[in-house]
Image (tube, rainbow, N blue to C red):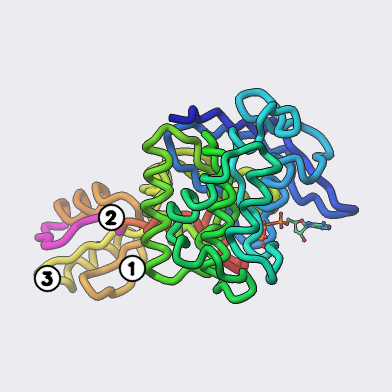
Amino acid sequence: MPAGAVIEFHNISKRFGGVAAVNDLSFTVEPGRVTGFLGPNGAGKTTSLRILLGLVAASSGTATFGGVRYRDLPHPLAMVGAALEAASFHPGRSARDHLAVYTIAAGLPRTRVLEVLTQVGLAAHAAQRVGGYSLGMRQRLGLAYALLGDPGVLVLDEPINGLDPEGIRWIRGFLRDMAAEGRTVLVSSHLLSEVQQSVDDVVIIARGQLVHLGPLSSLDTDAAPQTIVDSPDRDALAAALTAAGITFSIGRTGLLAATPDPGLLGHLAFTAGVELSVLHRQKAGLEDSFLALVGGGHSL
Ligand SMILES: Nc1ncnc2c1ncn2[C@@H]1O[C@H](COP(=O)(O)OP(=O)(O)OP(=O)(O)O)[C@@H](O)[C@H]1O
């Protein structure tokens, strides 16, 4: 089984003229887990991944696989599989021919071609010209290329873009399987909801900078500003809230009080002699937390 390696971004910065595309970015990605690399369009994800793969030089900092830069890896295809752009295949050539060229160049057995095309569900289209492929099929072909060397690390830029619902279901399982085999899986997306069901960890960037890092569950914040509270005597409850200076609006399941602290409302109701029928914090969804972190004004 291929061993995953730790990916490390260490103080990576990249400027394009006056634009700071990536700004002092540091994080690590662990083997055996799927890590979502998230951020709105223009946040710097593609630039970071291109730096990691040695396609763009960083202005400063280092990005490595197991401590080694991509260009210094002895057998890059066998260690790192990357799929950055879905559309870069020559339209006149078949998937099989495309991959055959790479196997020859990398000294891999020709049998890998059909193996990886089967793995990504493209075996039946192996002889078809790529020009006739849908975006989803090109995405799968990109993955097939990434898998050629049976690498321990996968770096995938927006692999879910363009997939139909069946394709999305498939790739979620695929990412999980890859990580379960011990591989390191780094997958970028501008939509948390796209990868939410597949990722263990998230690295979130905005405007080139790290804004959040941790397990997916770390996004499930308790920072929701509202608590839902209700009473058989709603008027009395409303009066008690008003007297305590707590603003509220009337929601579907009760009063939405502007406090994150149910205990405070429980105490208030108790001292006012108001019976409560509902009392719970309104949980912010993961997507809400994500949007709050990246500054919801961006196009997502
Ligand atoms: N070659 C380049 N020359 C000049 N500016 C660039 C270049 N590549 C990226 N940028 C700028 O760097 C910033 C980050 O872009 P990048 O493509 O890395 O973001 P992203 O998070 O991958 O977004 P997207 O999902 O839209 O690709 C953007 O402001 C972009 O316009």
Disc sitting over residue 213 in the figure: none
Residue at the outermost right position: 17
Residue 294: tell me if it is visible.
Answer: no
Q: Position of residue 77 (x, y in %)?
A: 63, 38
The residue indicated by pointer 1 is 248
- The image shows residue 226 at horizontal and vertical percentages of 34, 59
Q: Nearer the viewer, residue 72 or 275?
A: 72
The crowd level at tag 2 (other Cα within 10 Å; few <14, some 14-19, many 20+) is many
Residue pointed to by mark 2: 281
Q: In percent of the image, x 52 and y 45: which residue is there?
A: 112
Q: Nearer the viewer, residue 193 or 161?
A: 161
Give the class, few, some or many, for how many residues have Cα within 10 Å of label 1's Cα (few <14, many ≥20). Answer: some
- Span of residues in magenta: 272-282
In magenta stretch: residue 126: no
Pinpoint residue 293: horizontal percent, then vertical percent: 54, 53
- Taking the image as shown, residue 34 lies to the left or right of residue 266, namely right
Q: Which residue is mark 3?
A: 233
Q: Residue 288 occupies which quadrant of the picture?
A: bottom left
Are the residues tagged 2 and 3 within 8 Å (C-beta)?
no
| Residue at 61% in and 65% down | 94
Give the CA separation, mark 1 to mark 3: 16 Å
Instruction: State which quadrant residue 107 falls in.
Output: top right
